[in-house]
Image: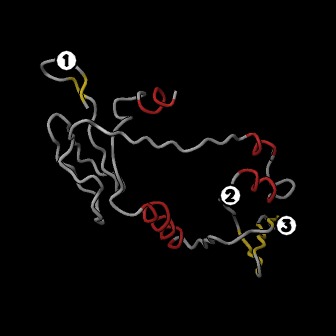
Amino acid sequence: MVFKTGLLSDPAAADIGWARVPLGDLHDRLAREALDAAGVRTEVRNRVTSVSADGNGGWSVEVPGETIAADAVVLAVPQREAYDLLPEGALDDPGRLLAIGTAPILNMHVVYDRKVLDAPSSPPSAPRAVGLRPHRRLRAEARPVSGAVPVGRPRRHRRTGRRTA
């Protein structure tokens, strides 16, 4: 089902790409800079002991040694911990948090019997996305998106009509 849903749902679903910057830059630093620019205070690696409504439409968040007043709170914790932290009335149906299932992250490593790209086996560290050079019938598309480079789409071979990577 994963292959059908994730890889075969669209011709571009199996495009290959890699980050040309550390994932922390993509997922943390850039988001934090945008939040900081908007005047948002972010706390990471700070254990929240309780969250409560302050009576004025805001929130009080207890962390070791401090109570933080907030207009909004984002709990980046698993659903069970969020359920335990949220005060009565914070959600219409807090039990729905416990109904959310979990699934492991799946990585697939493919080893080919021949070279498919004129590229290093691991991406060079560079602060920007660049295109890849195609090798043989693999077509590389230089469409950088947020630091990643999508590579190739399955195509039909001119002579045989078979799908190629």
Could you say which disc has been placed on residue 55 in the image?
A: 3
Q: Nearer the viewer, mark 3 or mark 2?
A: 2
Q: Earlier in the sequence, mark 2 or mark 1?
A: 2
Could you say which disc has been placed on residue 77 in the image?
A: 2
Q: How is the image coloured?
A: secondary structure
Label 1: which secondary element: loop
Residue 13 percent across, percent down from the top left: 39, 35
Estimate how packed mark 1 is, as few (under 14), some (14 to 19) or many (20 or more) residues with alpha carbons within 10 Å: few
Label 2: which secondary element: loop
Q: Amino acid at mark 1?
A: Gly
Q: Picture quarter containing residue 87? A: bottom right
Residue 30 left/right relative to 131: right
User: On the image, numbered disc 1 is attached to which residue?
Assistant: 161
Residue 116 percent across, percent down from the top left: 21, 40
Identify whether 25 is placed above or below 64: above
Residue 75 left/right relative to 38: right
The answer for how far apart the CA atoms under marks 3 and 2 are is 24 Å
Identify whether 147 is placed above or below 141: below
Name, please, the residue furthest toward the bottom: 65
Q: Earlier in the sequence, mark 3 or mark 2?
A: 3
Residue at 26%, 38% (x, y): give it.
Answer: 152
Q: Earlier in the sequence, mark 1 or mark 3?
A: 3
Residue 104 percent across, percent down from the top left: 59, 43
The answer for how far apart the CA atoms under marks 2 and 1 are is 49 Å
Q: Amino acid at mark 2?
A: Val
Residue at 29%, 57% (x, y): give it.
Answer: 123
Estimate how packed mark 3 is, as few (under 14), some (14 to 19) or many (20 or more) residues with alpha carbons within 10 Å: few
Residue 127 left/right relative to 40: left
Could you say which disc has been placed on residue 132 in the image?
A: none
Residue 72 percent across, percent down from the top left: 69, 63
Q: Nearer the viewer, mark 1 or mark 3?
A: 1
